[in-house]
Image: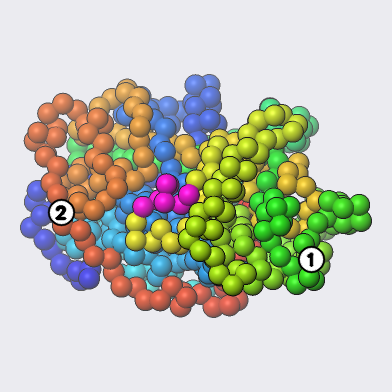
Amino acid sequence: MMASPNVVDSSRKSSNLRVLVLGLDGATFDLLKPWIDESHLPNLAEAIRQGVWGRLQSIVPPYSVPAWTSFATGKYPAKHGMASFWRFSPGLGTHTLNSAKSLRSATIWSILSNMGRRVGVVNVPGTYPPVPVNGFMISGLMTPKENVDYTYPLELKREVLQAAGDYAANPYASVSQTIKFLQQVIYWERKREIAHRHLLASHEWDFFINVVQGLDPIQHKFWQYMDLNHPNFRQAEAQRYAPLLGECYAVVDEAVGHRLSLVDERTVLFIISDHGFGPVHKYFHVNRFLANHGLIAFKEGRAYRPQTRIRSWQGRVLSLAAASVRRLDFLGLRRGLLNNVMRHQLNRVLDLAHTPSIDWSRTRAYCSDASSEGIFIHRDADGGMSSLEYERLRGFLIEELNALRDTGTDEPIIHGAYRREEIHCGEYVHLFPDIVLDMARRPYLVTERLAVSEVLEPVHSQDSGRHRPDGIFIAIGPGIRQQVQISDISLVDLAPTILCALGIGVPNDVDGRVLTEIFEPGYLPAHPVKQLEPVSAIDSGKPEDAYTTEETAAIQARLRALGYTE
């Protein structure tokens, strides 16, 4: 169990360094590097000049909650238990939201708290509800609403509101492709940065992290206006959005500049993202693919086949209707009159109205959720499935998936389909789909929708960007090399590297390694890497106890707005 917040440990004397982490959710050098080279982001350019940088490999699939948790633990999700936004119940078609209560591994901040180090953890996705630490914590993405207790200690919420004048732990409940939304991002990231600077200046800390959330939803919704090669790029609209998009990234660059000003003889700065980003050109409807192979059964008593003449016509009509609802913005009425939850419930109703109920007793394979990017095998279907039948079905599907090509471009749809144990290893591997889809840099967005007539469908204008595995990494400070680009960096390498920089031992059960190549010659001989026995996770209660039914619905609507689930 974690030490009490007032514990002081003698290990503090082993290193006078402190570590500052600025997380930029979804940041990618694919966008940033050209702007850096064109002098649009001077502080990021200076950070690269002063330190070590490179592309950082995320997890598979690269989604924010499991990715940030992998950063925090130094472990892949099959070891820390946060496989997705959701915890799935195979065979039932149901799932519950993951939260901090789902975590089954120690984090950087829990290890440091046990060692008597002071920590500040702010806006990291997946940290709701906040847990006691030797310092302070403010939860981020997955905080259900603003009137909950999202800080530790509780009185910190009032302090932050007073310091910034306004504050939101998870401000992007409504995400849209509008000027108003871009203005909202600028407003909230400036307000939150005021709060972050207050915390940095007024509280003692040995380790501090805050995550800038705004880049992720911007890139989901506006990628087509920052990418000349996107099929939905429109010059006139791109020019209309360009000033505000530029200001959004300028706000991030200002935060980088402030953190650079804090780097001194005892402060190391890491600038990181949990994953990268890239374009979406088409949807990949995985359940349509499975239904076409007769692997999803319906209660109407026969396979659902909209490719027949009548079904195909109905499927196209419903797809058109759903797309119309998403695109409709006549005089701004849809966004003005329907809130985020209502809009996505309407889209959901259109889909469900045309999709017969799934017969789980006869369904053999299905995709539960877009963010799982995988296929669950229902081994209890049809009276049970032997191990041999299970492996034959997995082998068949993997072969079929790897052979899928986009007839319009003749390119593969997926980078690779794998048995889950080929990608993941750990106690919680059973939480992953039986078949994992590695989409890598392919321009296809996985969905679980069934009310469609084709496996591939051109993307509509509201979903133009998707997560990619290559994020960003920059390190600056005492003992760090300068003006060096490195490669082969993994998200799970950061926790052991940070613990090493702080003079703390590295638990020997982590998946990551210490990035020895970022340190100057002579640093590690003077600060050798020490090993720790595995650190027990905090028992934070049952995962299903984190959210009420109403809160679950609100978070699910937010995730749908970002394209993480249909």
Q: Give the residues drawn in magenta, as a range.
A: 419-425
State the CA–CA distance, disc 2 to disc 1.
58 Å
Q: Which residue is mark 2?
A: 532
Judged left or right of residue 524, residue 284 is right
Residue drawn where x is 36% and y is 52% of the image: 425
Q: x%, y% of residue 514?
A: 24, 40
Q: Is residue 484 left or right of residue 508?
A: right
The reply to whether residue 386 is visible in this rendering is: yes
The amino acid pointed to by label 1 is Arg
Q: Quadrant of the C terminus?
A: bottom right
Which residue is pictured at 70% across the width and 41% down the height? 282
* Disc number lying in front (2 or 1): 1
- Residue designated by label 1: 302
Is residue 156 rendered magenta in the image? no
Label 2 sits on what residue type?
Leu
> CB of mark 2 within 8 Å of CB of mark 1?
no
How many numbered marks are there? 2
Where 322 sits versus 477, above or below?
Answer: below
Quadrant in which the N terminus is drawn: bottom left
